Image (spheres, helix red, strand yellow):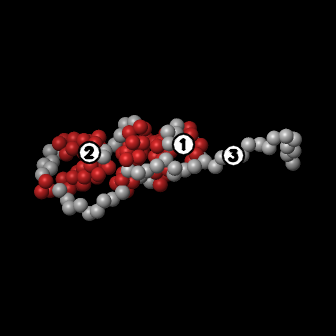
Amino acid sequence: AVTAILGVIDHAETMGADRFRDRALAVARAGRLKLSPRSRPAPSGAPTPIGLWGLSNREREVLALVVDGRTNRQIGDALFISDKTASVHVTHVMDKLGVSHRTEAAILAVRAGIGGDAVREEPIPPPPTGGTTVLR
């Protein structure tokens, strides 16, 4: 358990996720774990924040749209899902990131280098002007 908690703390520090780190420390205190520097695992390279957070592909798309400042309805429209499903995805992303607000999730994503350009809607061309359109 000590190794796992220390790994989480190291990852949180790498991401700059202070609240996530604080929650891991709270779990360690609740479990009465002794976190000594000797028990720290050797770093095995710097994994990407997305891999650390354990986000699915869909959750990454949702996070990118949250970074863009999209509402649940706009996320749903962009991903062809209902706004309720988008809301569930946003909640799961925030849970995995250990944050309680969309803004915090967006800040973590930006700090990790994740931009909001993951999903772009194709613009719908305006209807032709002048003349009438005949439907057949």
Identify the secondary structure beneath mark 2. Answer: helix
**Residue type at numbered disc 2:** Arg
Determine the CA span between mark 1 and mark 2.
29 Å
Sequence order check, earlier mark of 2 and 3: 2
- Choose mark 2 or mark 3, whichever is in front: 3
Q: Residue at x 15, y 48 (%)?
A: 33
Sequence order check, earlier mark of 3 and 1: 1
Q: Residue 8: where, in percent of width, then height?
A: 26, 51
Please give the label number shown on residue 116.
none
**Residue type at numbered disc 3:** Ile
- Choose mark 3 or mark 1, whichever is in front: 3
**Residue type at numbered disc 1:** Ile
Q: Residue 4: where, in percent of width, then height?
A: 23, 54
Q: Residue at x 12, y 57 (%)?
A: 38
Q: According to the image, label 3 marks what residue?
A: 124
Identify the secondary structure beneath mark 3. Answer: loop
Let me know if residue 25 appears in the view. Answer: yes
Determine the CA span between mark 3 and mark 1.
17 Å
Sequence order check, earlier mark of 1 and 2: 2
Q: Residues within 10 Å of mark 1 (few under 14, many from 20)?
A: many
Let me know if residue 83 appears in the view. Answer: no
Q: Residue at x 35, y 40 (%)?
A: 99
Residue 46 located left or right of residue 66 = left
Q: Residue 103: where, in percent of width, then height?
A: 41, 37
Q: Residues within 10 Å of mark 3 (few under 14, many from 20)?
A: few
**CB under 8 Å between discs 2 and 3:** no
Residue 8 located left or right of residue 129 = left
Q: According to the image, label 1 marks what residue?
A: 75
Q: According to the image, label 2 marks what residue?
A: 21
When the figure is inspected, residue 19 is found, relative to residue 39, above or below; the finding is above
